[in-house]
Amino acid sequence: MAELTPDKFKIIGYSKDEANRIDRPTISYWQDAWRRLRKNPVAMSALVVLCLLVVMVIVGPLIKGYDYETMNVSLKNLSPSSDYWFGTDNLGRDLFSRICVGARASLIIAILATALKLIIGTVYGALMAHFGGWVDELLMRIIEVINSIPSLLVTILIMLVLGNNLFALLVALSITAWCNTARQVRGMIKQLRTSEYVYAAEVLGASHWHVILKHYIPNMLGILILDTATAIPMFIFTEAGLSFLGIGLQAPAISLGVLIAMGQQNMDFYPAQLFFPCLILCIIVMAFNLLGDGLRDALDPRLRQ
Amino acid sequence: MGKYFVRRLVEMIVTLFLIATATFFLLEAVPGDPLAERADKLAPTLKQNLYAKYGLDKPMMERYIITMKGICVGDFGESFVYAGQTVKGLIKDRLPVSARLGLQQVVLGVTVGLLLGVLAAVKRGTIADYLVIALSVLLISVPHLIFGLLLQKVFAGNLQWFPTIGWPAGKDLWFGGWEYTILPTLTGCFTYIATYARLLKTSMLDVVNQDYVLTAESKGLSRGQVIRKHILRNSFVPVITQLPMSIAMCITGSFFIESIFSIPGIGQYYVTAVNNQDLSIIMGETVILAALYIVVLFITDLLYVAVDPRIRITGKGR
């Protein structure tokens, strides 16, 4: 074997900066999640459908200029036509406008109820995790008691006490729903607090706020976004069910549930009046479910290969 | 085990007591006079008697104690709206109806769901798998309220294959009048099919990657044997935990299904009572449904231990 001598080597140029260069751009958690979500055709179509629906419930009644309340007895129970896309109801009101306004109300109720659920649940969960000990134990017991009764019963009782109005509905919907959020937040904080990277950040001198902003909040946002995606369709459905049973909102207030209940009365002769509110409800719920599945895959690092 | 049992029993009673108390005071806060409609046309003395009969002339705390004592001995009082109807009597008439509906739903839904779940897991990545996934997304996304209405409209209204509303009574209560029960059962079972198909599939795919499955395969067991003896059995733990949720869904689902199909069960009874503001009935039925649910939760915890020997009761009794 030939002997290796220094003169057989020559420096072809290097720089110390090159050694530490990272070729690919750094991708944050959220960029990565968004990239994954974008690659998921089902979730993206659900997102598009949801955006279209939101646009529809906002501008829908303006397209044809029909008011959702104006009655016109000479035009009652019309079949769907180019003028009245979904037909008219038994008082001659344009069903398309009514569905847009009803779906808007249902969505707003669901979003507000979800916001309540998230706020109460996060604060409650954070308190449990922060204090620990007997406070944690006591607060957990309260959740267990609430969970040991079917939630629809509680919802109905609250509606009974507070009456058939929007405020009552919001309270009734969120009064049991926050338990799940609280549990998840508590678990996440407890897990984070003992995890090595948070410990490392603290040892390296990161301030309390840095840890909260950089580690706690991003980790919890994932949970909370997923929670939102599952809570909204659940609330929409519960609201529709309650209104259908006559326990939720009642006419002249309007929501998908109220429209379905009215549609059922005319089901035998004018099926369109039942079909369209049901269809819109299904589309909303299905789009949220599919988007939620996509978000779960995108946001949950444990599922990644 | 004995100590654990006793501790859980005490916990259940305390929980039920808390629920009953909360329900009582919630119903106290319901605005309006529950007897107003009946007492309106009566002479003052009769009115007084009526209020005395329901104990509404007594102060709230005294009524609370009377109510709680009544619950302890199984006396839930008489309906505010329909004189002579007691909660106990009505529950006795109506519980079997709801029980049959619920059983049929759970049995059909869980069986079909589990079969589809196994199919999807075994044929992973094939058309069968995608069909099952698509079906379960569809079934989960369409609320049973809407399924009920559509089934009723199409199969009872348009095609007239089945009666629109009603439920077998008398000697057909348990094993007859099937044509009445088919649509309500189908309505309710779809959610179970979707839930259990998804659940078992995910759970089976989790188990497939475990080391003991590799061991079983490498010692030469056939694929069928591995699936039956190792994968399926271990996949059933999450399925068992899901069951109490299903029972809860049965209870709350019955509210909608029984209303759609006019089935004289406890769900429709509860909704009617709520719409009539029949507070004594609501009180009684809330406590009974909560008790039912708590017992189911307890049974589930016991099942847990029975199914998975890795889970041990962590009471001090052992």
Image (cartoon, rainbow, N blue to C red):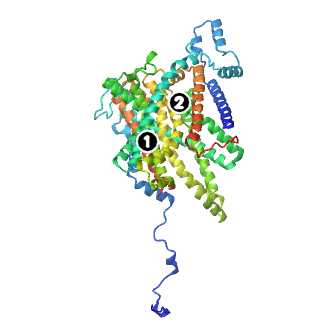
Q: Are marks 1 and 2 on the same chain?
A: no
Secondary structure, mark 2, is loop
Q: Residue at x 47, y 29 (%)?
A: B103
Q: Residue at x 53, y 52 (%)?
A: A222
User: Can residue A201 be seen at all in this image of the molecule?
Assistant: yes
Q: Position of residue B55 (x, y in %)?
A: 67, 15
Amino acid type, residue under disc 1 in the picture: Ala
- Looking at the image, which is closer to me, A66 or B229? B229
Vertical relation: B266 (above or below) A35: above
Residue extending furthest toward the front: B220
User: Can residue A300 be seen at all in this image of the molecule?
Assistant: no
- Looking at the image, which is closer to me, B253 or B313? B313
Q: Tell me how far mark 1 sits from mark 2, CA to CA.
A: 38 Å
Q: Could you tell me how many numbered marks the image carries?
A: 2
Q: Say the numbered circle drawn on residue B197.
A: 1
Chain ID, mark 1: B
Q: Are marks 1 and 2 in contact (CB under 8 Å)?
A: no
Vertical relation: B262 (above or below) A242: above
| Among the 4 quarters of the image, the one containing residue A142 | top right
Residue extending furthest toward the left: A82
- Looking at the image, which is closer to me, A36 or B44? A36
Chain ID, mark 2: A
Assess disc 1: are there few (<14), some (14-19) or many (≥20) residues with their C-alpha within 10 Å of its C-alpha: many
Q: Say the numbered circle drawn on residue B148.
A: none
Q: Position of residue A182 (x, y in %)?
A: 60, 44
Q: Position of residue A300 (x, y in %)?
A: 50, 53
Vertical relation: A98 (above or below) A29: above
Instruction: Kindly identify which residue carries mark 2.
Output: A165
Assess disc 2: are there few (<14), some (14-19) or many (≥20) residues with their C-alpha within 10 Å of its C-alpha: some
Eye-nearest disc, 1 or 2 = 1
